[in-house]
Image (cartoon, rainbow, N blue to C red):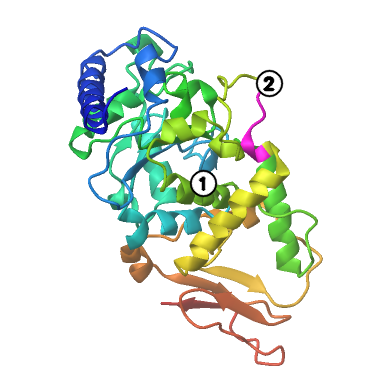
Amino acid sequence: MFSRHSTRRLQKAFNRISFRYTCRRCLSDVVASTEPSEFYLRGTLQPGPLRKSQNTDSKLLVLDLNGALLLRGPLTKGPRAIWPRPYMHTFSTYLFHNETQSWLDTMVWSSAQPKNVFDMVKTCFPTSHPSLLRVWARDRMSLPPEQYRQKVSTVKNLEKVWFELRSLRHSLYSTLLMDDSADKAKLQPYNHLIVPEYQETIRNVDLEVLRCESRGVRAIEDYDDTLLCVIGILETVKQQQNVAKWIRKGGLVLEETQDTPFRDSNTQNWWQIPEIKKHWRQQGVLALDKLQIKLQPFRPTWATVVRATPSLAQPTPEYLAGVCLPKPPDDHAATARKLLVVDLGGTLVLRGPDKPIERPPNSKKKVTKHRVS
């Protein structure tokens, strides 16, 4: 039997060895193995690093972009369309709230090329992207030159992140990788928060809900609430001393009594269990309510023209998808000119930064176009 003092000494020695081992492995550019190491697996069973105070340890959230936070449109001659996931603005507000930032560090790591990553980050975090700890792209994947521009399977080795942020002392105890692909987390599977991929079919459902709301009709389904569930999961992860151990023991599915096997194609994910998904969503809504953050499925466009009278022609999905676009930067919004198109047969409402402008149906019809500065 070890004494309490001896146990603490062994735990501190293990933490020092873990940090040095991580630094040595990160010096290698090419990952030789696609399986988690024995050292990592032993670390997922440790109680966690000793805390110097009773405050919650800081955590690290590594975010993926395409498929996790947004959906990219098909390839065209021009820039590809980017459609953020519902509640993306709410999720961003939560991540960079002062209280959240006191215990959570956030960075982005995408397998896309740097120029595309920049566009996606600006869309998801139009005003808060400077608060991201790091923004990594495909050039951090350690791919051979011949595979850099090819669509190949990639792995996100979190040991590189831990080495880069070694001054913050993040490790398997405090890190969560949010990604829609299980292959990305092969080396650290118990630090992986897998989320359902945001696909075209899910986006079409979101657009249908948005279309029903614009008509004042109750929709059969609801918006995709994955990001609300992630907020609930983060609130629980905040209290964990060893994130990897919590996931390995089944924390995501609220079963922390048994050892969870490696995830395979037959493993049921947390969002596939209605009771579990409902629980995490409720936790996320409670956290947002505590921080007084409003639920916003989509961030309204900075200027949208809407007819007040009913029309036989229905808005196209492309037009409705414009509601997902971010608000332009403040410097652009201040100098841009707005175009107000007047319908001579009814009332027109301009929803933008100014108050709504209405024109009665019986007013003079001399002017067919106005420019609002």
Q: Quadrant of residue 305?
A: bottom right
Residue at the spot 69% in from the left edge and 80% down from the top edge:
344
Label 1 sits on what residue type? Ile
Give coordinates of residue 61: x percent, y percent.
39, 41
Q: Is 24 displayed left or right of 227 in the figure?
A: left
- On the question of residue 322 being in view, the answer is no
Q: Amino acid at mark 2?
A: Asn
Q: Secondary structure at mark 2?
A: loop
Determine which residue is flagged by label 2.
266
Which residue is located at x 45 percent, y 16 percent?
A: 150
Nearer to the camera, 3 or 313: 3
Q: Is residue 224 above or below residue 176?
A: below
Lateral position of residue 133 relative to residue 275, left or right: left
Q: Position of residue 247 (x, y in %)?
A: 50, 33
Q: CA distance from mark 1 to mark 2?
A: 23 Å
Cβ–Cβ below 8 Å for labels 1 and 2? no
Number of residues whose C-alpha sits closer than 10 Å to that of mark 1, classed few (under 14), some (14–19) or many (20 or more): some
The residue nearer to you, when weighing 126 against 76, is 126
Which residues are drawn in magenta? 266-271
Horizontal placement of 15 versus 129: left or right?
A: left
In this view, the residue farthest toward the left is 167
